[in-house]
Image (spheres, helix red, strand yellow):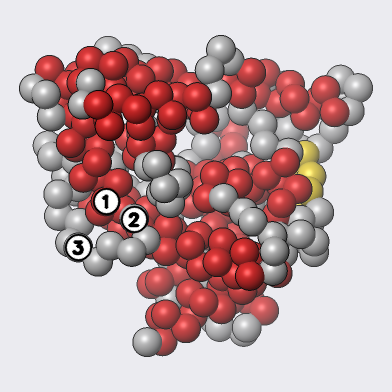
Amino acid sequence: MQDVLLVGQFADFIAERWRTGYQHTYPITRHRAWNSWRARHGGQNLPWSCESLSQAAQHWCWTSAGGKFSFADLAQGLQNAIATGDESLAGQLCHDIYGWGGVALKPADRSRTWVRQASQKGELTKALRDAVSLLSPDSALPLDRFNDHDLLMTSATTKLYAAATAAGNVAIYDGRVGAGLGLLARQFLEVRRIDRVPDVLHFLWGPPRTAAQARARTRDPSTACHAFRQLPNGARSHRIRAELSRRTNVLFQAVTDRLGQRQTPVTFLELERALFMIGYCVR
């Protein structure tokens, strides 16, 4: 009961900062992922910033954002393939989503192999449906099927599950989203003067790709009082990541419900993009 109350209070904290009252900024690099941000500022390499969580979502930047197909296009195609049971098309769209996300690009990557093998066995569309059902915020079923051979849960496959949900109630949970959630959770706990991180608000983060950023711990929202662990890898990590995903979906459902009551409709995708941008640097 205490956990439910705490999640509700955290959802209020996020909802109150959706339209106004949340400032965040950090320096950017010259990577092409920031092209859309630079375009807003006449080509200048100005620090990224937002003054609300909704503005963070509006300022979403991603390398593949200007690609041939948007995430919405790929998601709609995958949902259609699942509905018709088209294993070949579903497999191709999963690989396209990996390309959009810049993940699982090597032929031998475990997440890519999983898609190929499941499609060849005629099991991919069912696996995607099952994963979405288990990760949905209204599910209380065990998550034991998320393991290294049944349903994979990685920074790559989380994008497939988010795309596969017609209801739009499964978000992408990767290292940056986890970092953003961790930062917000820490700020919420600081405001309430809670000097520890309750399990229900313990969102795990993933390290950046560059060595310099890793040394600076740009994705680690921890302080002396509030410690957040790093996302694990390996065979045992799939269930942990699935638990984090469903916990996030429960939270997002609470936030969207609260904002909906205020006549401010918000999608899981918008929430995820806001956190993705905040999570680039939480220092």
SS under mark 1: helix
| Mark-to-mark CA distance, 1 and 3 | 9 Å
Q: Which residue is mark 3?
A: 141
Q: Earlier in the sequence, mark 1 or mark 3?
A: 1
SS under mark 2: loop
| Mark-to-mark CA distance, 3 and 2 | 10 Å
Q: Position of residue 266 (x, y in %)?
A: 62, 54
Circle 1 crowding by C-alpha within 10 Å: few under 14, some 14–19, many from 20: some
User: Which of the 4 quarters of the picture holds residue 79?
Assistant: top left
Amino acid on which disc 2 is placed: Ser
Q: Which residue is mark 2?
A: 136
Residues under numbered marks 1 and 3 in contact, where contact means CB atoms less than 8 Å apart? yes
Q: Position of residue 210 (x, y in %)?
A: 54, 29
| Mark-to-mark CA distance, 2 and 1 | 5 Å
Q: Residue at x 71, y 47 (%)?
A: 56
Q: Which mark is residue 133?
A: 1
Q: Position of residue 37 (x, y in %)?
A: 77, 29
Q: Is residue 217 visible?
A: no
Amino acid on which disc 3 is placed: Leu
* Image depth: mark 1 or mark 3 in front: 1
Q: Is 217 positioned to the left or the right of 24 in the image?
A: left
Of the 4 image quadrants, the one containing the N terminus is: bottom left
Residues under numbered marks 2 and 1 in contact, where contact means CB atoms less than 8 Å apart? yes
